[in-house]
Amino acid sequence: MRHLLRLVRMKAVGTAGGSGRAEAYEFVIPLDGHGRLDTWMWHEERGACTVKRIDAGRLQRIGMLTQRHDGMWAFSYGLSDADDEVLPKFNAQPFVVGRSVAVVDTDNRSCGYEIVEVGPAIVLE
């Protein structure tokens, strides 16, 4: 079923420099036929659902797309929720080029990102 996994690239809306927020993200996500998160598929393929946080054109952190104990979706970089970047309404929105995605950082600031690319993911076994 890995053919349903997609690589999504999104960039900060406005300037990210010096604000502590990421410049861009790249993440692997299973999408349904409407371009929304396929939660069933995520349960099957969660190990492939990685995220890369990019700052100043460089890879800064690698993490995973997770569903936290409170039900919220997040980009997680460690074992606790303390470093999670929360993704409000993540499972309800379509992932298509031009759409906006909110990311709430560890300082509880909501930052906007625009989806700039959605394509097939290359996942190595």
Image (spheres, rainbow, N blue to C red):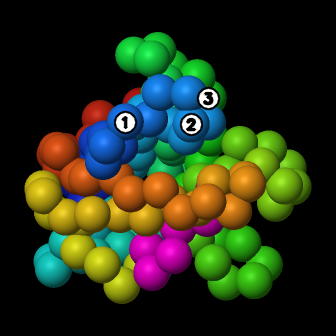
Which badge, 3 or 2, comes first in the chain's sequence?
2
Name the secondary structure under disc 1. Answer: loop
The answer to if 87 sits in the magenta stretch is yes
Residue 21 spot, x, y in % from top left = 55, 40
Separation of marks 1 and 3 at Cα, in angstroms: 19 Å
The image quarter containing residue 38 is bottom left
Residue 87 spot, x, y in % from top left = 53, 67
The three-letter code of the residue at mark 3 reads: Arg
Asked if labels 2 and 1 touch by Cβ distance under 8 angstroms, the answer is: yes
Label 2: how many Cα within 10 Å (few below 14, some 14–19, many 20+): few
Q: Which disc number belongs to residue 61?
A: 3
Please tell me which residue is depicted at 72% across the width and 72% down the height of the picture: 68
The three-letter code of the residue at mark 1 reads: Thr
Separation of marks 3 and 2 at Cα, in angstroms: 17 Å
Magenta range is 84-90
Side of 61 where 112 appears, left or right:
left
**Which residue is under mark 1?**
15
**Which residue is under mark 2?**
19
In this view, 62 is above or below 33: above
The answer to if 78 sits in the magenta stretch is no
Name the secondary structure under disc 3. Answer: strand
Residue 95 spot, x, y in % from top left = 23, 65
Please tell me which residue is depicted at 39% across the width and 16% down the height of the picture: 57
Please tell me which residue is depicted at 77% across the width and 49% down the height of the picture: 83
